[in-house]
Image (cartoon, helix red, strand yellow):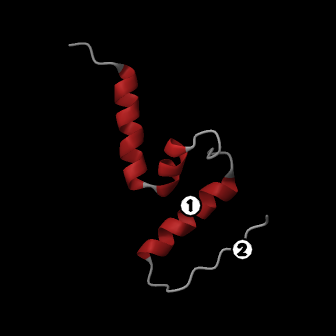
Amino acid sequence: MNVDKNIIRRGARIELARRHFFDFCKLRMPDFYKSDRKYLVDLCNDLEDFLTDDNQVLIINEPP
């Protein structure tokens, strides 16, 4: 049985995207969402944390 490695990689990326918001963003727009852009990783993590936290207000202060 010959399984295409690209299909396996894509399946792994999709599974990560289901678990982490940053991985979802990276899957949708890989040229913009890169792991070395710490501010994007932090922003995605903060958004994901907000959804699971009891806070009722989210304030995002980002430069233009």
The x and y percentages for residue 55 are 49, 85
User: Tag 2: residue type?
Assistant: Asn
Q: Quadrant of residue 29?
A: top right
Name the residue at 45% across, 73% down.
51
Q: Quadrant of residue 11?
A: top left
The residues bearing labels 1 and 2 have C-alpha atoms spaced at a distance of: 14 Å
Q: Are marks 1 and 2 in contact (CB under 8 Å)?
A: no
| Mark 1 residue element | helix
| Mark 2 residue element | loop
Describe residue 40's horizontal placement relative to residue 26 as left or right. right
Q: How many marks?
A: 2
User: Tag 1: residue type?
Assistant: Cys
Describe residue 8's horizontal placement relative to residue 20 as left or right. left
Q: Which tag, 1 or 2, sits closer to the chain's start? A: 1
Task: Residue under label 2, please give it.
Answer: 61
Query: Within 10 angstroms of label 2, few (less than 14), some, or many (20 or more) residues?
Result: few
Quadrant assignment for the C terminus: bottom right
The x and y percentages for residue 27 are 50, 42
Name the residue at 45% across, 78% down.
53
User: 31 above or below 46?
Assistant: above
Residue at far top of view = 2
Task: Residue under label 1, please give it.
Answer: 44
